[in-house]
Amino acid sequence: MAIVDGRVTEEDFQEPLAKATIQLRGTGIYTVTNRFGYYRMKLPPADFMVEAIHPGIYSEFYNMSTYEGIFTPMGAVRLEPTAVGRKEQRDIAARIAIAKHPAATQNSSAFDLLKQAGSVEFNHLLSNQPSVYLLENGSGYGSSEIRVRGFSANQNQIVFNGVSLNNPETGSMNSPLYPGLNDWASDVQFTTGVASGKQSELGQTGLINVLPLMPQKKFGVNVLGATGLNGYLKTAATIHSGYNKRNLAFALKLDRSSGDGLADYTGFTSYGMLFNLYKAFNHRHSILLTNATKSWQSDQRSRPDSISKFAQYGIEHNSNWGFLNNKEQGWNGNFGFTNLAILTHNWHKQVHSRLVSQLYLEFTNSVQTHPSGTMNGLSPYQLPPSTAGLVDFDTISQYNDGRTNSETEGITILAAATRSLRWGMQSQYLHEFNKQTKGFIQIDFESYRGRHFGTVNNLLGAAGFTSQADLNGTTGNVEKLLASAFLPKTGKADKADHSYEALIRKVGASLNLEHTGNKTFSYLEAAFFVKSQQRTDHFNYLSSDPLAKTDAVNKMGWRLASGITYRINEFNSFRLNAGASASPARFNILFPSANNRENPEAENRNLYSGDLAYVLSSGRFYIALRGYAMYQQNQSNIQRLMLNTEESFALINGLEQFHRGLEFNSQITYLRRHNFYLAISYAKWTYQKSATASVYDNANQLLSRLQMPMKGYNTDNCPPVSMYVKNEFNILKGLEVNINYYRAFKSYAPLLVHDFDETDSPEQIKLPSFDRLGAGINYYHEFRNKRSISVFGEVHNFLNNEYINAIYTNISSPEAYAQNLAHYGSPMSWNVGLSFNF
C-alpha cells in the first residue's frame, strides 16, 4: 500500500481549504481535508484519476500512479476560486494568514457558512470557540451579542468589507445589518484577544472580520430556502453576471426571513439586499462597489423577568405583551431601515506597491417602542398582570379612555426614533520591501450624527397626548403618531419626548510591518486616533437657549500590538502575542442622561494583554494551547435597575479587571475522514480594586456617592470555565453529520450599587452549570455540469434544557432568590434548508 498525502489550498492566497473532498474518480474511495487543508490516504498499486472538490472553487482532476517505481506524489493541490476581485477586497479588509500569525484567530469553513445561511442567528457561528459566550438578550431578532474572555460585548469589533459596524455611540455589536451577515458572508475570520487590523480604532478584546460574497467569474444563479421551528422561513436568490469582456462582474442577492420567534411574542420579518460590483479598468486600476440594505420589523423580549415568573409560565414566557380588544399588543417593538454603501478603489502603482482607498456612507432610520407614564401611581412594569402573566391592555385602555395622556400621567406606548448618518474614508499604502518584509500605512476619518427623539406609537385608548417638553409648538399636543412599518416615516411624526443629537468625529492613522523568515514570522502594529464627541439637546421651550450644546470632548486613543511565531519544524510552533490600547469613553458613558449631563470621571479605558501559545498542526492533528493575561483599567458602567424610587441612574467609574486563563483548541482526524473537536476554557476573571458609584435623580442632581469594594469579585454573566465538543462523521462522500455538546461553569451575577448598603462583602450569586446538546447535517454535491446542491440542517439545545443565560440582579438570600431578574436561554430550535447553484 502506498501512502498519499498532501495539502489543498486556494490559488489566490495559498490559504488552506478545510473539508475539501479528495476522491478517486470511478471508485468509492475518498477523504476529507482538515482545517489546514491536509489529507492522507492509503492506496493499492494502481493508476487513479483524483478529483478535489470544495464550494466556491473550480474542481480539478489529477492523474496519479501508486505503482512502485513510478509513484506520483500529490503534494500541494491549488484550486482556482470561482470569484473575482478577491485580492482587492482583502487589501482593505486585513484578513490575516492564521497558519503563521501569532494571534488567536480561526477561520470559518465554507461548509459552516453554508449551514449558517439557513439561520437567523449569526453569533452561533462564533460560540464554539474557547472563552466565547453567547448573550441572547431575550432571544429576539438580532438581539444577541458575544462576550470574549469575560469582557463586555461592546469591546469586540465587527468589520464588514473593511468598515466597522459597531454603534458609534454605544459600541454595541447588534447593528441593524448584523442579522444579514448570515446571508452575505463568504469569509469569516474571528480573533480573540489582541487582533491585527487596519483601522486606527480596533476592538480591544475581539475582532470579527467578515468579507461579503464576491461576483463569480461565470454566470450563475443560486436559490436558497430554509424553514424551522415556530414558522421560521427564509428564502434567498443570488444572480452572478459573470466576468464579461468589459472586465466587469456583479452579484445581486435578495433575501427574506420571517418567523414567530423562539420566545413568546418575538415574531419578526426582514428583507435584505446585497449588491457587489467589480470593475477592472486595466492592470493598475479597479473598483469594488458594495451596497448592503436591510429592513426589518420585530417584537422583542428586551426586559428581563423574575425567575419566579419563568418557573410559573415557562422559559419561553414574555411578560411584555398581551391583548387589546382581542388583538396582540406588545410594549417593545423594533423596526427600521438601514443602508451601507462602500466604494473601494485599488491602484496598483508598482509591482510591489498598492494604494487602496475606500469611501463609505451609512444611513439608518430605526425605532424602538417602549411604555411610558403611570396608572394609579404605578409605572407600566409595576401594573398587575393578567391571569396569564401578560400585560392587561384592556384595563389600561379603560383607564385611558377620555384622557389626554402625558409623559407622567396615563399609559402610552412611545417610540424612541433614531435617524443617523455615518460616512467616512480610509486610505492605505501597501508596500512589499522584499520577499520577506511588507507593511502598510493607513489614514482614516469618520463622521457620525445621530438624531434621537421621542414620538407616540399607540395612545392605548386615550383621547390624545400632550408633551410637557412642548416640542411641537405652543400647545404641545401630539397629532401625528408614528406607526410601525418597515420604512418608518419618522420625519412626519410629532416629537413627544426629549430630543437630542450625537455628533462623533474621528481621525486616525495606523502602521504595520510584517517579516517572514525561515522559521519565524513577526509583526509590529501601531495606531493612534483623536475622537471628538458632542451632544446637543433640543429645548424648544427655552427661548434663551433652544439648542444647548456641550463643548466638544476631544480624546486621543492609541494601540500597540506585536507578536512573533517561531516554527520548531514543519508542524510545531510557539507563538507570542502582546498588545496595549487606550480607548476613549463611549458617548453613552460620557453623556449618560438628558440635559447635556457630562460624566466628569469618564476616562480612557486602557487594556494590556499578552498571549503565549504552543501550536501543533499536521495532517491528522491540530492542537493549540494558549495562556493569556489581560488587565483593564478605567471601565465605566451605568446602572438603571434596582434603584430607589427617587433615583434615576448610577454611574460606576474606575472599574479594574484582571482576566487570565488557559485555552485549549484541538481537532483530530481519524479513520481518514472523521473529525473530533475539543475546545476548553479555564480562567479566572476578577475585579482588582474598589470603584466609585455616583447616584443621580431625574434632574441629574447628585444624591449620593459611595465606594464599591469590588476587589476579588468575579465579572458577571460570562462563564470562565467552559467546554465545547463536536464529532463530525463524514458518512458518505459529501455527507457530514455532527453531534456537538457545550457545558458552562461558574457564571456569576453582577454586583449593584445597593448590594453594598449593609456590608462591604455581599455574597455574589453563582449560577448553576448548564449544558446544551446539538446536532447538524450537511450534504454537498457537485454535478458534472458545475451545478451543485447543498442540503443542511441544525438542531440547537436538542434536549430542551432550561438554564439562565444572563442574570441582572444579585438577590442572594435563598428565600428571595426567585425575585432576581434574568433572561433564560433559548429552548430547543431547529432549521433545515436547501441551496442550489446552476
Image (cartoon, rainbow, N blue to C red):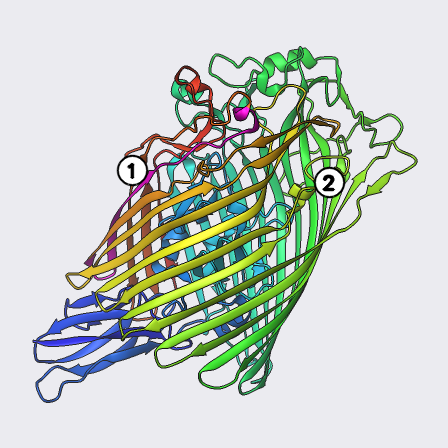
Amino acid identity at mark 1:
Phe
- The residue at the far right in this view is 544
Residue 749 is one of the magenta-drawn residues: yes
Query: Which quarter of the figure has residue 557?
Result: bottom right
Please tell me which residue lies in front, 440 or 242: 440
Q: What span is colored magenta in the figure? A: 731-756
Q: Residues within 10 Å of mark 1 (few under 14, many from 20)?
A: some
| Relative image position of residue 793 (x, y in whole percent) | 32, 48
| Relative image position of residue 556 (x, y in whole percent) | 67, 57
Question: Which disc, if any, is residue 798?
Answer: 1
Dot 1: what SS?
loop
Q: In this rendering, does residue 81 appear at all?
A: yes
| Relative image position of residue 290 (x, y in whole percent) | 58, 64
**Residue at 31% of width from left, 69% of height from top?**
573
Q: In this rendering, does residue 100 appear at all?
A: no
Question: Which disc, if any, is residue 598?
Answer: 2
* On screen, residue 338 above or below 566: above
Q: Residues within 10 Å of mark 2 (few under 14, many from 20)?
A: some
| Relative image position of residue 79 (x, y in whole percent) | 34, 76
Tell me the CA gap for discs 2 and 1.
48 Å
**Residue at 45% of width from left, 56% of height from top?**
193
Amino acid identity at mark 2:
Glu
Q: Is residue 85 left or right of residue 780?
A: right
**Residue at 54% of width from left, 64% of height from top?**
560
Count every numbered label the image shows and give the total. 2
